[in-house]
Amino acid sequence: MALDKATVARIAALARIRLDEAELEPLALELSQIIGWFEQLGEVDTSDVAPMSSASATPLPMREDEVSDGDCQGAILENAPQRARGFFAVPKVVE
């Protein structure tokens, strides 16, 4: 699938990317090549490949759920640029 300059300009506008007219043609060629690679992947026979949810077949370790409050409010608030009464202080954004 070959992309033309108008399509690349439309994609750039949707992505809020400013492109000069001179950049459209090389980018159209490059994007067309990338789409060509995806089309090649579509031609690969994967009928004998089992679906998988992870690259490794290792099961995830399980642990018991324990309820705790974390008890680390001071350590967390050390990262706050401003704090007030034990909370992160942020500028007011609603009038």
Image (tube, rainbow, N blue to C red):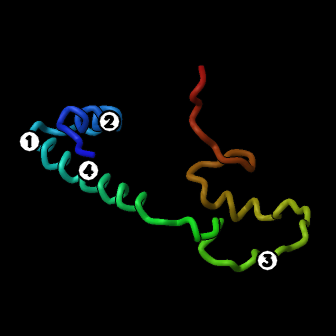
The residue shown at (90%, 71%) is 64
Mark-to-mark CA distance, 2 and 1: 17 Å
Q: Residues within 10 Å of mark 1 (few under 14, many from 20)?
A: few
Whether residue 85 sits left or right of residue 80 in the image: it is: right
Frontmost of labels 4 and 3 is 4
Q: Which residue is identified by label 2?
A: 16
Q: CA distance from mark 1 to mark 4?
A: 15 Å
Residue for point 70% across, 65% down: 75
User: Can you tell which of label 2 and label 1 is closer to the viewer?
Assistant: 1
Q: Which mark is residue 61?
A: 3
- Dot 2 or dot 1, earlier in sequence: 2
**Which residue of the protein is positioned furthest toward the top in this rendering?**
95
Q: Which quadrant is the C terminus positioned in?
A: top right
Q: Establish if 93 lies above or below 47.
A: above
Q: Nearer the viewer, mark 2 or mark 4?
A: 4
Q: Residue drawn 59% across and 30% down?
A: 92
| Badge 2 amino acid | Arg
Question: Of callouts 4 and 3, which one flags the residue occurring earlier in the amino acid sequence?
Answer: 4
**Which of the two residues, 38 or 70, is positioned nearer the viewer here?**
38
Q: Amino acid at mark 3?
A: Pro
For marks 1 and 3, give the CA distance. 54 Å
Sequence order check, earlier mark of 3 and 2: 2
Q: Quadrant of residue 54?
A: bottom right
Frontmost residue, 33 versus 87: 33
- The reply to whether dot 2 and dot 1 touch (C-beta < 8 Å) is no
Which residue has dot 4 on it? 31
Real-space CA distance between mark 2 and mark 4, rounded to the nearest whole angstrom: 17 Å
Q: Secondary structure at mark 2?
A: loop
Rounded to the nearest angstrom, the CA distance separating label 3 from label 2 is: 43 Å
Closer to the N terminus: mark 1 or mark 3? 1
